[in-house]
Image (cartoon, rainbow, N blue to C red):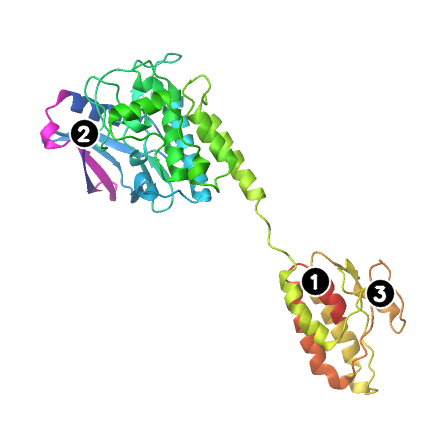
Amino acid sequence: MGVVYEAEDLKLRGHVALKFLPAEIENDAAARERFQREAFAASALNHPNICTIHEIGEHDGQRFIAMELLEGQTLKERVSGRPLPLDQLLELAAQIADALGAAHAKGILHRDIKPANILITDRGQAKILDFGLAKQMLPGRALPAHFDGTTEDDPHLTNPGVAVGTVMYMSPEQARGEELDVRTDLFSLGAVLYEMATGRQAFDGNTSALIFHAILAQEPEPASKWNPRLPKGIEEVIRKSLEKDRDLRYQSASGILADLKRVRRDAETSRPAPAPDAAPRRSAPSAKKDKPSSGRHATAIDSLAILPLENASGDPEAEYLSDGIAETLINALAQLRKIRIVPRAIAFRHRGRDIDPPGGGPRARRSRRSSRSHGSARERFDRLRRAGGCGAPGAALGRAL
C-alpha cells in the first residue's frame, strides 16, 4: 500500500525509495495507522533479506518512509506460473526463512507473507517487503487476530470485518480469526514454497469462500504431481509447513531453514561428478598411434621412474639429450598429484640397467629413440604434459614411456 518514488538523499549522496500514502486515503485513520506500523516494524529489523528503513518523516502534511532502493522483480513475477530451478528455489527459500526468523526473534509477525511482498534483486537476493500488517507480540504471548484492515494488491482480499491478510496465503488459524503466533507466518511461507516449487498456488478458487474452505478442510495436491523432479526433501518441508494443526507444523523459521540446508546438501552430494580421466582418454589414441601399449601399462599407475634416455645414434654431440629430456620429464611430471615420481638422484643410479627402480610401481622402460627422432621426442613430451593436467595420467604416461 502506497506510492513509491525514487529520490536522491542529498546528505548521503545516494538514491533511496520514498513511499507515500496515496492522496485519496491520506485522511483515512486506519490507513495512516497501518503506514506507521509498517515503518516502525521494519525499522526495528536489521537483516540483509529485509528492506532497510532509513527514515520516517512528513513533508507538506504527507507522511513518508525513506527506504533502500531495490532493483529487481517480485517473487510473484519471477515465478509467473513456472517452477523455479532447484538451486534458485533452495537459495531464495533459505533467505526468506532466515529473514522471518530474524523478525520473529524481535517479536514481529509479518502476517502477509506472499510472493508479491518478496522482491528478488538483480543480484538474486530476496528482500521481504511491506510490513503494513505486521504486529508486535508480547514475549511469551500469542497475538490476537484483530479485524483491522485489508491488503490492497491481490484479487482475493480480505474485507473489513474479517481477519487480515491475503486469503490464499493465510494460515487456518488466521482464517478463523484465532490468536496468532510465529507459526502463522510459517504456514504462509509453506504456501509460497509450494508456488515456487510448482508454479501453482497451494490453495486456489474462484471466490474467497472457496479458498477459505480449501485452507481449512482440504490438502493441496502433492507438489511432485506438478513437478516430478522435485526432491522428496523439499516436498516434506512444504508438507510440514502446511500442516493445518499448528502443533504439528514447524515451530520456528530456524527449523525450516535447517531442513532446507539439509536438502541442499543432499542435492549437491547426489549429483554425479564428471569423470576425471575424460581428457587423458581423449589423448590415448595419439599415444597408441606412436607406440602400442602393453596390457600392463594400460592400467593406472601410482609410481614412475624416469631413467636417462639412451643415445642410440652414437653421436657424442647428442649425448646431452639423454639427461636433459629425462630431467625435463621429471620436473614436469612432478607437478601431478596422483602419481609419485621417483627423484632424479635415485632414478639416475640405474643408468644403463634395465631394472625396476626403488619405490615400486610399474617397471620404467628406457626410450630407444635415435637422435634423428629429437623432434618426435619433444612432441611426445608436450602431449604428456597436456594429458597430465587433467587429473588421471596413469594410462597415457605408461603408453608414452
Q: Secondary structure at mark 2?
A: strand
Residue 312 visible to the viewer: yes
CA gap, disc 3 to disc 2? 83 Å
Q: In this rendering, would 151 be left or right of 236?
A: left
Q: Judge by depth and name the residue closer to the eye, 203 or 385.
A: 203
Residue 21: say if magenta.
yes
The residue positioned 78% from the left and 65% from the top of the image is: 297
Q: Position of residue 110 (x, y in %)?
A: 32, 25
Residue kind at label 1, given as amino acid type: Pro
Q: Is residue 285 above or below residue 217?
A: below
Front-lying residue, 208 or 163 = 208
| Residue under the point 44% across and 30% down | 238
The kind of secondary structure element at disc 3 is: loop
Instruction: Let me know if residue 148 is in the magenta part.
Output: no
Residue nearest the viewer, comparing 285 with 134: 285
Which residue is at a point 76% across and 73% down the rendered structure image? 292
Q: Check disc 1: other Cα within 10 Å, few if <14, some if 14-19, many if 20+.
A: many
- Quarter of the picture holding the N terminus: top left
Is label 1 in a helix, a strand or a loop? loop
Labelled disc at residue 57? 2
Q: Say which residue label 3 marks.
A: 363
Q: Which x, y percent locates residue 201?
A: 34, 34
Estimate how packed mark 3 is, as few (under 14), some (14 to 19) or many (20 or more) residues with alpha carbons within 10 Å. Answer: some
Q: What residue range appears in magenta?
A: 7-29
Amino acid type of the residue tagged 2 in the rendering: Gly
The answer to which quarter of the image holds residue 196 is top left
Q: In the rendering, at what x and y percent does residue 273 appear? A: 60, 51
Amino acid at circle 3: Arg
Give the residue number, with chain letter if any, for mark 1.
Answer: 393
Give the foreground label among 3 and 2. 3
